[in-house]
Amino acid sequence: MDYRDSPEEAAFRQRLKIWLSQRSREFPSADGDAYWAGQAAWHRALHAAGFFGLSWPKEYGGHELPPVYDVILDEELARAGARPRPSLGYLVQGLGRHGREELRRRFLPPMIDGSERWCQGFSEPGAGSDLASLTTTAVRDGDEYVVRGHKIWTSYSDVADWCLLLARTDAGAPRHRGLSAFVISMHQPEIEQRPLTMINGVTTEFGQVLFDGARVPTAQMVGAPGEGWALAMTIVAHEREPAELGFTARYGKLVRDLVARSARSAPAAPAAGRPPSADLIWAYVQTEMLYTHVRRRLSERLDGVAHGPEGSLDKLLMTETEQAVGHAVLAEAGTGDPELLSAYLYSRAQSVMGGTAQIQKNIIAARILRLGAS
Amino acid sequence: MDARLSAEQRELRAAAAKLADDLGPHSVLDLSDDTRVARLEKAIAATGWRTLRSDGAGGVEVAIVAEEFARGLVDVPFLGPVLADGLQPSPEPTTIAAPGGPHPSPEPTTIAVDARGISRVLMLTGNSVQAAQVGDAVTGVDLTRVTAEVAGPWQPVAEISPEQAQRWRALALVVTCADLLGAARGAHALACDYAKVRAQYGHLIGSYQAVSHPLAEGLALIEGTVSILRHAAWAVDEAAPDDAIHAATLAKVYCARAARTICETSIQVHGGIGNTWDCLAHVYLRRALAATELFPVRLEEIDCGLS
């Protein structure tokens, strides 16, 4: 056990620090719509400099480094005040594990280098937690499938070139078995975008997507007909791990900004600063916990530990942390600062996106604690 | 960077867990079984784990044993002797003293902790190690450990370096964190076992989300506790002394909150039975409360830093 950097890790960190000191100002950290607008350029710049896709296969544009390098990347991005890295790990895992070699070779490199952008079409208005009840259909027509249905909570759908789509291909099969996954082009007139305005005013993160006769070649089915549920489970399991997301470092940065803010704003004794609120200190403790947790989880992957339901534990810890940071924002800044208020409001989504906190608890109770059906 | 336990550390955990499972109390009645306590004492004395520090073991190893002993409610001394050994090795059974005592107390006082069958006690003041004798037992919240008055006067017996003193203080915090984690794990397992046998409305209570969700939250808290404690235990010996203290204070705040929540959940899951003396849930809670108060850290003491 050694939490310090190995010589190789230290050299990587140093290289990254230098690059960030020179380049990260071109991609200012931002909230709300400005953040989403700049994310594609940031992704391409990170990849071009060799700092993205660190643990993914070289043949698809990754670097095949141990997973702990992602921790170093996240830490240094946060320290530099830079944007978090784009979160794509779940898509890479989903396509990498379930897609045929031709699909992987065609789609993974541009996904990883940021030249093609992706969204994920899973949730529907009538199929949220109960994903297997989805009703979007894909009907075979010669060499193509024809897609009709309504997807929602589709992040970046307005800028995506491709969508990893889950649709029903066999209405007669038991509901989990009748689903298939596709890589479908978002550039077709039969696809309509409707943005969703979130409670913090952001309009470009989540969208609704309506498919009305959109077409996808049969060769772009991921896996075999009826194997869509297996892919969906791979994706949601990976989506739930804080290690897959650059978010952890974002919380740390927000906490540091709040501490600095508290030290500055001491009306009575400006020199001494105001002591941080209990909510802020607790958010700091939780953030530090999450750092150590991500480090432990990623270290465990050196043993090739398969991540199944344990991701739900990580997701709950991440949610607790983000929402504690949200409460620290309120304690420190009230509602007066629009950017901070937006961060607080956004934190409420963390216990819903990627599977609600209640669904995570059902998974933990049934599959880890074996408490019986929930 | 590698946060995994080594093969030796995993073996140590398995050995400590087995000893605790074999000879620790399995009921409140077992707590007063002197024959069992004597066998447990003999078995633990034979392991040599009370002198882990003077044998060169790190904070991680000490934390592993402390955690498994708390999980199994081991009711003979370990925490006290292993910390005393970390201050000044001695052939005579020795424990440590810490600020505390009966409340309200007319003046600040120290009590000997984890003192069952032990007559000598050490305390660190500044960089000075002082020794005294263990006095009469006093009532404490923890049913698995004996606390006692200190029969003065304190005599200086050794001077350690400022760095050694810092590292010892970090170790002391880490050992209490490990005690909290072990107690939380024990209480959580007790509640999960109960939820799989207790039925109401024709179903096992574990099948109800009102019961299973707090237990799932408890497991998440345990995982967070494992992570923050492991880093702090490593830092005792490997990080700069100030960083070791910082990591340990963070861990203490997190572990204490998590353990209390988990122990309270365990009592709640047990329903009426959980509120009776004969249910082990309160024994875990009491152990957790005692570990929280031993070298306590208040939230306001945390340095959020700007580094």
Image (cartoon, coloured by chain):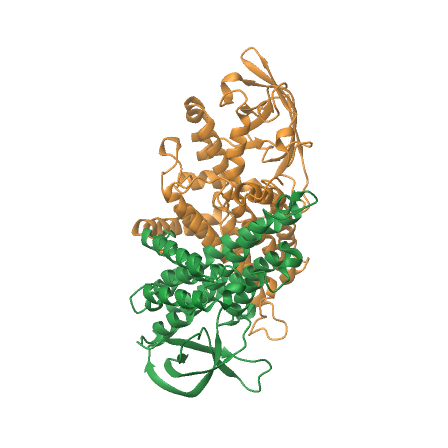
| Residue B199 shown left or right of residue B22 in the figure | right
Along the viewing direction, whichever of A166 and A76 lies nearer the viewer: A166
x then y, percent, for residue A61: 39, 33
Residue for point 54% across, 74% down = B140
| Residue A195 shown left or right of residue A286 in the figure | right
x then y, percent, for residue A1: 35, 54
Along the viewing direction, whichever of B163 and B68 lies nearer the viewer: B68
Q: Is residue B281 visible?
A: yes
Q: Is residue B29 above or below residue A103?
A: below
Colour chain A appears in: orange
Farthest-out residue, bottom: B153
Farthest-out residue, right: B201
x then y, percent, for residue B275: 64, 62
Colour chain B appears in: green
Q: Quadrant of residue B126?
A: bottom left
Residue for point 46% across, 34% down = A93
